[in-house]
Amino acid sequence: MKPALLPWLAASLLASSAPVLAAPQANAEGAELYARHCADCHQPNGEGLSGIFPPHRGHVGALYAARGTPDGRHYLGQVVLNGLTGPITVKDETYDGNMPAWEGALPPGEIAAVLNFMLLELDPAGLPDDFRPYTAEDIADLSREDLDGQDVRRLRQGLDRFGEQATPTVAKAETPAEDTTPLPLESLFPQAIQVAVQNSGLVTVLPSGEAWPGIEGAHYDALSPDGTRLLVSGFKTGNVYLLDARSGDVEATLPVGGVAQGVKISPDGRLGLAALPDGNRVAVIDMEEGVLIDQIPVGPEPHNSVFSEDGDLAYVTLQGGGAIAVVDMRQLAKRDEIATPGLETPHNLDISADGRRLWIRDFVGRVGVLDLETEEMLKTLAVGNGHGGIDVIPGGAYVATGAIADSTISVIDARDLTLAAEVEVGSGPHGVRASRDGRYLYASITADDTVAVIDTRTLKVVARVPAGGAFPFWIAVPGNP
């Protein structure tokens, strides 16, 4: 596995322009927001995960104090605003991945506040005597620069003591798992797909490239079985959007009482689910009326869901509980909870065509296979770093998973539960979904703003299609919910 980076900094809170010693209230609020938005990756204590998510503790103060043109203070603000793409070294360990930009998802005051919390609480010893807390105005000024994650990495290379990678790194060789023979796009997309493009606040339809704007923080998306409705969660907005999947018109904007993660639509198209990790519940949406009808307590930090074929049950990952919640969709109540030994942070999931197995992707680089009849974890496998989507490819031969802190799609043989291939696709692959017939696999590449198309017969990349915006996160495909 390659080392990784990813959500490198992140979170929120109100700004403070007070002196260093007068910021306890800001720090208290920042601590709460850091726990909500940053701790999954960088851990509650800010120490990160070795080789996957770099630490904040004992590191960010030295970055702030670093000299350069621009200096470390400028650089840190740009990291949170615009993300960071490419390899960095922290405490002699390399992290190579893609952190998303937070501009647009968080207002300037919140970005200022989380930076102040990180600096004052996680690395105060590294701060210089002339430290100045960030303000909302500081962040607004920084946001006037038009940068992307690769530009921000170049800023880091100009900092004293952090420019060890200023010499161009050796690029990865063009993957042998790539077929460069051009193919007509129409042949690669038997049906149009919808890509949630998070930082641009839109859904892109491929292969046409049609853009549906006005969907702030477009994060996870799911199609109804008949292909007429699209459900989209808004990253950090507290909204779920219901769209006409033929025109892209937003039919309803639903405040769900908390930040929504994964969304899913029942097999009969009547109900939608949205995972609400802050409230430990899932929201239930009436798809016909476009209204929120219930919220079901399920357990710690639900993240995504999948339905049984008949729609009677929904299985919900409990990322904070190391388990799967089983929800009775007729009673709209939690029925059971199944532990996921070997996967402490179950994140995304899919179900086998026969309904007997759950395939579960965790947050830090593993996949587990859970037998639903015996409730036994049959096997766990190491895959790419960080978290990602997972898809049981129609036909049943393969299961594919992304790795947002890596550069590969892991393809697993579903019959013998072994890793069949690691397909190089570019930095930060997250969402994965195959075409209805299982011939082509689509992967959203968050750092490159593309969708990679993999031929499942050869396990080679056959096309890279622009996603029409920044940070494509999830993919909805007709016939493969």
Image (cartoon, rainbow, N blue to C red):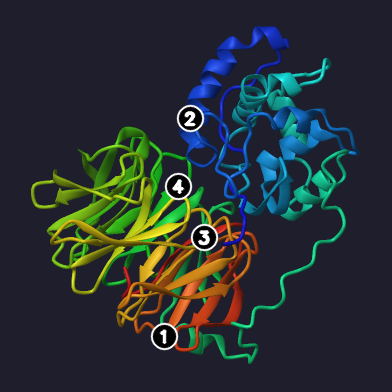
Spatial CA distance of label 2 from label 1 is 41 Å
Relative to 462, say whether 431 is above or below: above
State the quadrant of the N terminus.
Answer: bottom right
Left or right placement of residue 133 versus residue 10 in this view: right
Q: Is residue 395 visible?
A: yes
From the viewer's side, name the closer residue of 135 and 386.
386
> What amino acid does circle 1 point to?
Arg
Q: Nearer the viewer, mark 3 or mark 4?
A: 3
Spatial CA distance of label 4 from label 2 is 20 Å
Disc 3 or 2, which lies upstream in sequence?
Answer: 2
Q: Is residue 252 visible?
A: no
**Which residue is identified by label 3?**
403
Q: Judging from the image, what secondary structure is the residue with disc 1 in?
A: loop
Residue at the spot 82% in from the left edge and 51% down from the top edge = 154
Disc 1 or 4, which lies upstream in sequence?
Answer: 4
Disc 1 or 3, which lies upstream in sequence?
Answer: 3
List x then y, in percent, for residue 191.
41, 81
Spatial CA distance of label 3 from label 4 is 21 Å
Left or right placement of residue 91 versus residue 420 in this view: right
Residue at the spot 73% in from the left edge and 36% down from the top edge = 76
Q: Look at the numbered discs 4 and 2 and tell me whether their residues touch, using CB distance below 8 Å.
A: no
Q: Nearer the viewer, mark 1 or mark 4?
A: 1
**Which residue is identified by label 2?**
35
Disc 3 or 4, which lies upstream in sequence?
Answer: 4
Q: Nearer the viewer, mark 4 or mark 2?
A: 2
Left or right placement of residue 171 versus residue 22 in this view: right
**Which residue is identified by label 1?**
439
Disc 4 or 2, which lies upstream in sequence?
Answer: 2
> What amino acid does circle 3 point to?
Ala
**Which residue is identified by label 4?**
234
- Disc 4 packing (10 Å; few <14; some 14–19; many ≥20): many
